[in-house]
Image: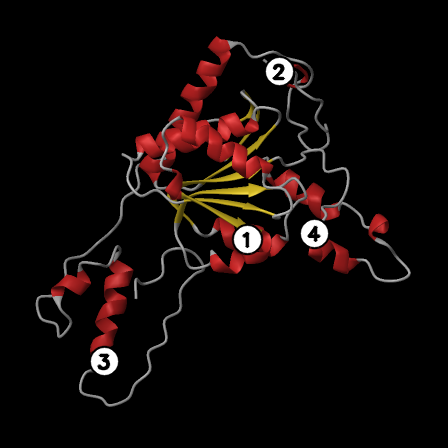
Amino acid sequence: MFAIVFYCWKSFPNLRCCDVGVRLVDAEGKLGVERALANLIKEAIRAFHRRLLVVFGREALDVIAYVILRHYVLKGGGDEKVVFVDWGEDETAYNKLIEKLGEEAYPIGNVRHYTYEDTHRIMGTTNDILILDMGKGARPNDIGRLIETVKGGGLAILYNLDLKAEKPWNTSVHRKLASPPYAESDLKNRFERFFVRKLENPSVWILEGWRIVKGKLLNPSRAKREKSAPPRKSKIPEQIFRLALTREQMEALRTFELLAGKKRGIIVFISDRGRGNPPF
């Protein structure tokens, strides 16, 4: 059971008065939240959508541990990839999360720990769950590029984010913004307020401990991928064509035949940013 803090009304103007104040969550309420989160995960996996969760409060790590465990079970176990990113100054939250997962016999080897300064090492990987410790905020580039490493059906979790956004985040980028005669104390919180406003998107869930502040199912249609059959005649082995996940990737492979019989050649592929680039 816990008490709810007061939220910044300007950040979430659509919240009802009953959503702001003090409320207690009993065991039955917790079970309801667990069922809602399980349905969210099922929906994300079924639709092959990434989903964003904001989790903060005293029991935030309990909620995150539950989400990781439930996602693992609903995906059928196996080699799930979970990434936890913080500033490396205090690993208490990471260690507590690992302890909670270990108590539930979760394979701890699935979890990788990085600092924001090492996020370049995450680029190019594909992960099931990404957890960003937002206690001090994050650099805009970190958020943009790391979210893209989450696969369809996966979850991105912003842990310990301050929704009131009353002051600027404390990152290396923010410190560089302060130049003489101004100091860091002169920085405004414009970006932070802008970022929090973006969380009003219907696809974003916000939880304070075991209480859902904001969140609903979107009921999207089941994901369908168009995949044509490999060409009957090709100099490229059929096994390679079958590695392609989409029709566009298969067409990209066929362009390599243009280089057949040539000593030199260049093929340039242009693709939207994301996880849909050709698998080669």
**Label 1 crowd (10 A; few <14 / some 14-19 / many >=20):** few
Residue 162: x and y, percent? 67, 35
Identify the mark nearer the N-term, 4 or 3: 4
The CA span between labels 1 and 2 is 33 Å
Find residue 173 and report its image quarter: bottom right
Q: From the viewer's side, name the closer residue of 264 and 94.
A: 94
Residue 215 visible in the displayed image: no
Q: Which residue is mark 2?
A: 2
Which of the two discs, 3 and 2, labels the residue nearer the N terminus?
Answer: 2
Q: Residues within 10 Å of mark 4 (few under 14, many from 20)?
A: some
x 36%, y 29%: residue: 105
Q: Residues within 10 Å of mark 2 (few under 14, many from 20)?
A: some
The mark nearer the N terminus, 4 or 1, is 1
Q: Which residue is mark 3?
A: 258
Residue at the location (54% across, 20% down)? Answer: 210
Q: Amino acid at mark 2?
A: Phe
Which residue is drawn at the image coordinates 47% and 9% (left, top)?
A: 28
Q: Earlier in the sequence, mark 3 or mark 1?
A: 1
> Which residue is more in the foreground, 75 or 121?
121
Circles 2 and 4: CB atoms closer than 8 Å: no
Residue 277 point in image, percent of width and height: 36, 61
- Nearest to N terminus: mark 2 or mark 4: 2
Frontmost residue, 119 versus 279 = 119
Which element is circle 3 on? helix
Q: Quadrant of residue 172 in the image? A: bottom right
